[in-house]
Amino acid sequence: MTHSTSNSNPPDEERRGLLKWSAILLGSLATAAAGIPIVGFLLGPLRKRDDQWTTAGKVEDFPVGQTRLVDLQNPLHGLGDGDAGKIAIYVRRADEATFQIFAVNCTHLGCPVNWLADAGLFMCPCHGGVFYEDGSHASGPPPRGLYQYEHRLEKGDLLVKLGHLPTLQQPG
């Protein structure tokens, strides 16, 4: 009686080859999927995106002497940003033709400030920063007043130039 001394037969080699190439293909796909965000992060600064004018509302929506919180969609938002693609601003109408548009972030560490209409002050709940109704610094650790956005009136609409958040290096 004779036995075959061969350790493999052709169907086993074909199966191993198929599994090997399947593992290489799946590994390549996984590497590409993990690498796309990294490449996007590295190339992101090369793609400059300018701020854009966004309608904050009709001029008559903002009564004289009042400050209102307005939520807007950031014009530079991405498809996967979700709620992070939104941006909030405070709109203050000082008189018929004078508006001030403030970023909601404290100039100390960026915590969102609250508008206290009765006191006429913006308060930062994180470290006690206080700002007057015109956005100027009143007390606490913030190094300056609230950041203001550029704005204009056009055909009865209040337009605000939004996109990048203001910082000490680029105040707006």
Image (spheres, grey):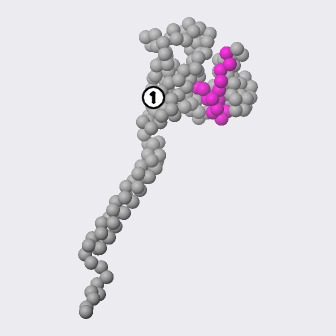
Between residue 46 and residue 6, name the one nearer to us. Answer: 6
* Residue 15 at x, y percent in the picture: 30, 69
- Number of numbered discs overlaid on the protein picture: 1
* Residue 38 at x, y percent in the picture: 46, 50
For label 1, the crowd category at 10 Å Cα-Cα, with few meaning under 14, some 14 to 19 and many 20 or more, is some
Q: Residue placed at 65% from the left, 17% from the top?
A: 134
Look at the picture and state if 155 lies above or below 55. Answer: above
Per the image, the residue denoted by label 1 is 75
Look at the picture and state if 119 lies above or below 20. Answer: above
* Residue 160 at x, y percent in the picture: 50, 21
Q: Quadrant of residue 113?
A: top right
Q: Which quadrant does the N terminus fall into?
A: bottom left
* Residue 39 at x, y percent in the picture: 43, 49
Residue 107 in the magenta stretch? The answer is: yes
Q: In this view, does 44 lie to the left or right of 147?
A: left
Look at the picture and state if 148 lies above or below 93. Answer: below
Magenta region, residue range: 103-117
Q: Is residue 75 left or right of residue 6?
A: right
Q: Residue placed at 56% from the left, 23% from the top?
A: 89
Q: Which quadrant does the C terminus fall into?
A: top right
**Residue at the bottom extreme of this rendering:** 1
